[in-house]
Image (spheres, rainbow, N blue to C red):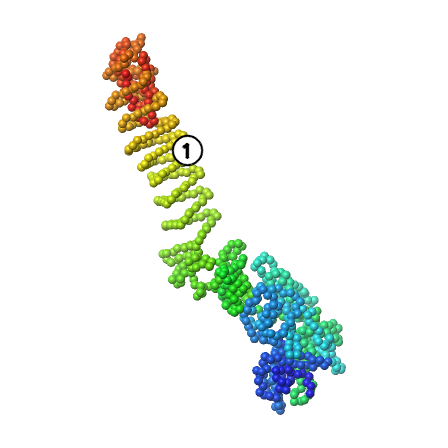
Amino acid sequence: MDRIITAHTPLPPEQLSFRGMYGQEALSQLFEFSVELISDSYTLDLKQLLGKPLTLEIQTADGGKRYLNGQITRCTLVGRESATSRYYVYRATVRPWLWYLTQTSDNKIFQHKSVPDVIKEVLADYAFPMEMHLSSSYRPWEYCVQYQETDFAFVSRLMEHEGIYYWFKHENGKHTLVLTDDITQHETLPGTASIPYYGPDRTTVPQEEYVSNWEIAEQITPGGFATNDFDFKRPGTSLDAKRMNPGAYDNGDLEVYEWLGGYTDPGEAEHYTRVRLQDLQSRQEMVQGTSNIRTLAPGYLVTLRNHPRESENREYLIVATRYRIHESGQNTGAGSIAMCDVDFTVLPSSTQFRAPRLTPMSHTHGPQTATVVGKEGQQIWVDQYGRIKVQFHWDRYGQKNENSSCWVRVSSPWASGGFGGIQPPRRGDEVVVDFIGGHPDRPIVIGRVYNGGNMPPWDLPANATQSGFLTRSQDGTPHTANAFMFEDKPGVEEIWVHAERNMRTEVENDEYRKVDGLRDTTIGQNDTTRVLGSRFIHVTGTDTLTVGMTRNVTVTDTETYTVNGARTLHVSGGMTTENFDQGLTTTVAADGETREVTGAFKETLHTGQEVVVTGNDSLHDVLAGTLTERAKGKVSVESTSDAMDVKAMNQVLVQSSAAGMDLKSKAQMTMTSESAGIDMKAPQDITLTSDTDVVLNGKKVKDLSTKSWLKATPFGLNLTVAQATIGMFNATVWRSNVGAAISKADFSVIKTDVFNVSNKIGAFESKNTGLKSESAGAKSLLAGLLTII
């Protein structure tokens, strides 16, 4: 006999035949059919059925065929059909091949791929038929993580997030997964252009398959959806988005707000707000019904007719179906269907269906650690934001390179606009990673830890009192590093700063340093200090400067040295003092200045020299040799407020080699020879001139000339108390002989202090050449010997 429903299993038809089926399928849900099969064998190997396809071939009312296909995922030997039956009942649970995704879980990272691309990659491992009928374009996700979740949960939540839903197209021997995102991608139910409605009040039995129950339901749903997110690259950009579609009833404008919308572009927000609101409002108006139509299946469009409420006679999308099919027992020999009931759910095709977000987002539970990775050959691998790449310990697909993860932001104790602190983790470091909102797609580094491969910079616990920072030169060794270390061990506390190469310190205002103990600075090469203002150095104790080579000091303005005590300048080589622009002034305030030159000392003055001594002055102390001072110009030695002595152990010569000599004194002038006479010689006249008397006083006054040089005057001449004062020259003359005419006389000069003196005694007038005494010299002793011949 011909059966209405035939079950095609891996076993021959005579071993297993259809008895009944209970099940349901719906959009974006895994269908599940419980199929009862009967066999006359009690010993069928159930494992031969598991994982194999099962197809139900159903004859339709118009003579066509409709198929339900799936994979046998569970098989049960129920037992004997009845006490008198020779058949045994087997129950097979049939599910779509997509169900296999619920039996696997993984941790996997997808980068720079759209959700459809991710779904294709995941489903490619299962080698079952799939079709995509998508109307929208989908952005690539920079970073998408499957974390501790099944493949089915992973792709389900991605589709629910993007507004993609699915259904299954059943064929003989297979079923195809169909992914879509728009009502226009659905087809009309094959072989059924419209379905009739016959209510309970019908008076006749319809001669066609029909809808016997039609329940209309409307409910309040949110009228608006708002969302927001944050893009750290554009922190000032608002990502707030909102979409409203209030229901035509009271309180139809209720709004749902969701933080972390999962986007960074304001244009993407429009897509997500539309999808979210369609999801919420797709259940606002739905119809549930009952029918005996064997072809009803989710994912197809049907049109209702013959409903008394005319507004219901329109096109609908079948959202879900529940099957209850039972065929007469095998032992009856009947060939008719005892029962075929189909409960269904539809919504108007004017409403866009969206799968409700039922799949929970996979969340992390607390922070975890990862290893810093990067490009081969690059110890430090960061971007302009200081982000790094990491290899998670759970990631079995990562290659531990720059593609192991997205760029991950790194937390810092101080992160501000262009200032703060930064220390990028390096390849091989172990970092602590948390996730914003618990989302695996949003990792952030919140810390770092040491491990057996990366030990602390200082041995512990031996150096537990040490803390600080020790860096490492890029691609360097433990011996190439910068360091800043604090030692807190009692008695040896210190701060240690080490620069592997250069060190720069900038202070824009004041800097203060205080060192209570010693300070030792060693500079291996040059040292340059630039002081744009004044510089003050105060040394309470001794200041010692040792220069191994040349020392140059340049002072563009005045230089002042103040030495309150003694100052010794020792120069082993030559010493040159040059002053090109102005004069040179040396002031010794107190105990005097001592200069000692072991070799020759030479001073050359190209213009003049002036030496001013406010106290005593001993200019020269020559222990051996001679002292010579020469000047091409005039030489002046002057004591402005006291006497001046010019002394020598031996003869003193005051000589003018090319001109005359003047000795002048404003007071009395005395020439004294303590142990010998005084001779005054001249190739010409010697003239003594006085405004008063000229006194010659000696034991004898001799005239040794051949001619008398004295001339008697009509009034006589008294030589007894004659005295002449001429400049600094004082002379007292005692008469030896008195007469009307004196031809010879002795003159004795008692004392003279002369410097550049020219004397003329005018009390006498001689027939011979007059008496003159001239002396010239600089800072020399004039011991003049005056002899009147």
Residue corresponding to mark 1: 583
Q: Give the image location of residue 721, x and y in percent.
A: 28, 15
Residue at horizontal 53 percent and vertical 63 percent from the top: 402
In which quadrant of the rendered view does residue 154 lie?
bottom right
Q: Amino acid at mark 1?
A: Gly
Residue at horizontal 33 percent and vertical 22 percent from the top: 775
In which quadrant of the rendered view does residue 118 lie?
bottom right
Q: Give the image location of residue 594, x and y in percent.
A: 33, 36
579 to the left or right of 677? right
Q: Nearer the viewer, residue 530 or 535?
A: 530
The N terminus - image quarter: bottom right
Task: Categorize mark 1 by other alpha carbons within 10 Å: few (<14), some (14-19), many (20+).
Answer: few
The answer to whether residue 41 of the structure is visible from this angle is yes
Q: Give the image location of residue 623, x and y in percent.
A: 28, 33
Q: Give the image location of residue 735, x and y in percent.
A: 26, 14
Q: Nearer the viewer, residue 220 or 484?
A: 484
